[in-house]
Each structure stands twice: as C-alpha cells, then as structure tokens.
Image (cartoon, grey):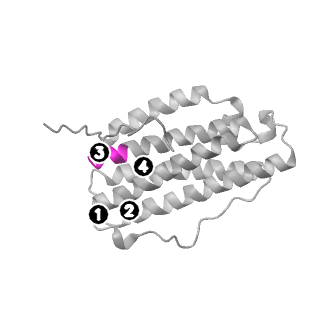
Amino acid sequence: MNTRLVIAPSQLLIARRRALSVTGAVLSAGAVALLGGRDAMAAGNKATPAQLEGDVRILNSALGAELEAIAAYQVGADSGLLSAGVLPVAVQFQGHHKEHADALAATVKKLGGTPVAAKAKYNFPVEKLKNQNDVLRFAAGLEKGAISAYLGAVPLFSDKALSQVAASILGDEAMHWAVLRQVLGESPAVPSAFMS
C-alpha cells in the first residue's frame, strides 16, 4: 500500500512558524541585526575592507539567486498549471524568497555595497513546463541548487553572523525542497545523510 503524507498549506505555515521561532532563538544578535538591515558594525564585526568586500560579493551572489527564485515562482504561478491547493504554497515560497532578498539587499547596503538587481529576463525552460509536476520539479531543482549554494557560502563569510544568517536561509530552502518532493509523490525525507 502506497501511503502519501499530504501537508495542507495551513499545517505548513504552522510548522514553518515553529521552525522559525526555534531558528530565531539560535541566531546571534549580530545576525538578527543584519537580517533587520541594521548597521553590521553594531554587531561587533571589525572586518577589514577586503573581508567586507568578500562578504558583499557572497551576499550579492545569494541575492542574485533569490531574485531568480522569485522570478521562477512567478513563472510557475502565472503558468496556470498549478492546482488551487498547490498555488498558495508556491506563492508562499515566493514570499519567503522575497524576504530573503530584502534582507540580503539591506545587508549589502549596510556593508557599503550595491545590491545586484534582478535580470530583465531569465532563461527558464518554460517550453518544458507542460503540467504541474513539471513546474514543481523545476522549483525543486532551484531549491536544491539554493541549498548547495548556501551550504558552500556558510564557511566563506568572514563575519560569522552572516554565516548564521546563510545557514538559517539554507534551512528554509531545505524545507521548501522537502515539501516540493512530498507534493511530487517523492519521499520528503532527504535522500542521503549529506547534501552536496
């Protein structure tokens, strides 16, 4: 017998709130300040100009990926291929990416950098999106790529508060990926003990 766990959007929202309340308790005051767009120097970081430049470059890479995800979820929402039960979750995930992008852009500015802008056009494989599962697989692929990107970025920041923020966003991307896998009928559990 094949039993599938179905998560209603309201259950997802409750689970996300619980996860964020736990995550928020772990973040340092500096990370919370950075997420709020306040002065990075107030967080106690005394980075060199080269270190700040490196952190801004990493943040801008993450910001570019978040802007791409926002655009991708818009393609999915506008496709007409998502069911009434799936569309609100996709829009909610897009909202999470917007929040990530806003926090990253604010942090880049506070560090003295210029946030990257969204591209005028992304080269998404829209011709291959024929049904809901195609859209969900496309979104899941982007979420898995985001997980890998944040995983690679976490140890690279000179400001460890930024590492904590990146790790928090990584966790959110992993939850998105797991939910998308579940909706696709795949196991929502991570298929291996380590992400790459």
Frontmost of labels 4 and 2 is 2
Q: In terms of sequence position, does the residue under pointer 2 or pointer 1 come before the other?
A: 2
Please state if 191 lies on the left or on the right of 70 as rendered: left
| Residue 92, disc | 4
**Residue numbers of the magenta segment:** 179-185
Q: In terms of sequence position, does the residue under pointer 4 or pointer 3 come before the other?
A: 4
Q: CA distance from mark 4 to mark 2?
A: 12 Å
Please say if the residues under marks 2 and 3 sit with CB atoms less than 8 Å apart. no
**Residue 168: where, in percent of width, then height?**
57, 37
Please state if 35 lies on the left or on the right of 188 as rendered: right
Residue type at mark 4 is: Gln
Q: Secondary structure at mark 1?
A: loop
| Residue 186, disc | 3
Main secondary structure type of the part rendered in magenta: helix
Q: CA distance from mark 1 to mark 3?
A: 19 Å
Frontmost of labels 1 and 3 is 3
What residue is shown with label 2? 76
Frontmost of labels 4 and 3 is 3
Question: Where, by quadrant of the figure, is residue 115 drawn?
Answer: bottom right
Residue type at mark 2 is: Gly
Question: Where, by quadrant of the figure, is residue 189 drawn?
Answer: top left
What residue is shown with label 1? 81
Q: In terms of sequence position, does the residue under pointer 4 or pointer 2 come before the other?
A: 2
